[in-house]
Amino acid sequence: MVLTKRIIPCIDVDLDEDGNPAVYTGVHFEDLKYTGDPVEMAQAYNEAGADEFVFLDITASAEGRETMLDVVERVADEVFIPLTVGGGIRTTDDIKETLRAGADKVSITTGALERPELVNEGAKAFGSQCIVISVDARRRFDEGGEHYVEVDGESCWFECTKKGGREGTGIDVLEWAAEAESRGAGELFVNSIDKDGTKDGYDLPLTKAVCDTVDTPVIASSGCGSPEDMYDVFTEAGADAGLAASIFHFDEYSIEETKSILDEREVPVRF
Amino acid sequence: MSTVPESPEEALASVVVVDYGLGNLRSVTRGLERAGAAVEITDDPDAFAAADGVVLPGVGAFREGVENADPIREDLLAVAERGQPLFGICLGMQMLLTSSEEGTTDGESAVEGLDLIPGTNVRFSEGQKVPHMGWNDLSLERDHPLVEGVDGEYAYFVHSYYAVPDDEHAAVATTDYGREFPSIVANEDGTVFGTQFHPEKSGETGLQILRNFVEICADD
């Protein structure tokens, strides 16, 4: 056997009206929809055969952060598979707090773009294995990039964005991926602003370009609408893990079903 | 479902998780508790001696691990000498060996591991994605009480170096990542052993291994 491809459910955690943690899922760019209690959901996914979890703290407030750490503790005490936590991590103290609460890895987006030394500091203090650098990539068809790939017959580059795609940075994703790896990132988490919420498949040219650039494992994210999309991102783009939210949250496909379909097509998965 | 002991008296065995300043000890502690152990996290050698078993956890680099554990080095060797179960996890397992290629980076002289399982740790070769990160399966090479019920099961790995024991028989299980490497090792009398993967992150398979460990401690 060989190393399996990982199937990772992602849970976006926000505070509900009463200030309690709740899982929300965005559907086709529409309003976030309440889908459950994070700890219960993590337990259910664990039993369903998830290989790992990603928790994203979308509360973006000090109060939300405290609540999130409490959720991380409760999940880590109940569920014995790897847990990655992202959202608002900007300092080595944030990394330390999150790991101490029971996370195995932290996912960092803006904090690392604004101060790349954070990657070195985190890797040195806690080990590369727990530093996941996340990019929110956006396709650009202009001349500002450094590395171009062919997308739908046109030449395009990928730009790192901040604030969930609302703010550009001018930084080429492939340059940043290579830099993050050389600074000590242990894994790259690749989101696509163009594909997010569409459910028409991962951004394959983007994912493939990142996989071809770095040697560290790559988690593909954004756009998964079916097990077929996972198949494509593993076989065509070379991703090591596929992340999905809504197809699992809304029971369109179970994790087991997804793995069975991949297994039938000879993608190695863990049962 | 939960077998977390209500009090230390109800626990099947007492286990010390060695705190030498590295890593997240929370998950391994919770996993051991779930497996029925009463756990104390400490670097106090008296507690090592009093416990039914000792866990040497660890993430990070070999040199840093060995140097951090240096003040308690003789105490860890004494655990093995007394025949108490000593369980190294991930870097903790690599530290049971004699040396590591990782300890020789930057041209500095090599640091010595505990040498309880003679051998060295080497880096995966070029062309392999490093770290070896994710779920991979265990192929049992021989019997050991730690591995009851886990042949062919998947475990969660995160590492860039792997153990090469001098004695081939030290490998209890192997795993394939570009090449076959020992994923569980044990010394000759079976009381010192380790897993390259993280049992506390390996779902039900990992909990089974932790339960087996607690059994070993209880029987001892």
Image (cartoon, rainbow, N blue to C red):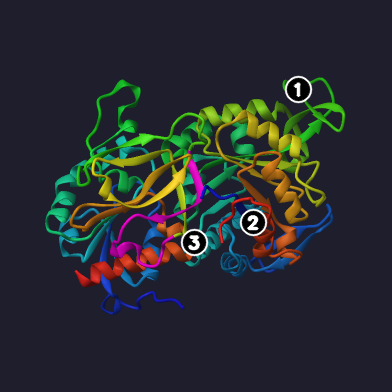
Question: Badge 3, how many Cα within 10 Å: few under 14, some, many 20+?
Answer: many
Residue with the mark numbered 1: A145
Chain letter of the residue carrying label 1: A
Distance from disc 2 to disc 1, alpha carbons, whole Å, reads 38 Å
User: Does A213 sit above or below residue A143?
Assistant: below
What element does badge 2 sit on? helix
Tell me which numbered mark, 2 or 1, is placed earlier along the sequence.
1
> Which amino acid lies under the numbered mark 3 shown in the image of this protein?
Ala
What element does badge 1 sit on? loop
Q: Which residues are magenta?
A: B131-151
Question: Badge 1, how many Cα within 10 Å: few under 14, some, many 20+?
Answer: some
What element does badge 3 sit on? helix
Q: Nearer the viewer, mark 2 or mark 1?
A: 2
Where residue B144 appears, as percent x and y from the top left, is 29, 61
The answer to whether A150 appears left or right of B6 in the picture is: right
Quadrant in which residue A218 is drawn: top right
Whether residue A192 is visible, yes or no, is: yes
The answer to whether B168 appears left or right of A213 in the picture is: left
- Quarter of the image for the C terminus of chain A: give it: bottom right
The residue drawn where x is 35% and y is 35% is B122
Residue with the mark numbered 3: A76
> Which amino acid lies under the numbered mark 1 shown in the image of this protein?
Gly
Chain letter of the residue carrying label 3: A
Nearer to the camera, A232 or A124: A232
Residue with the mark numbered 2: A263
Where residue A162 appears, as percent x and y from the top left, is 71, 37
Q: How many marks?
A: 3
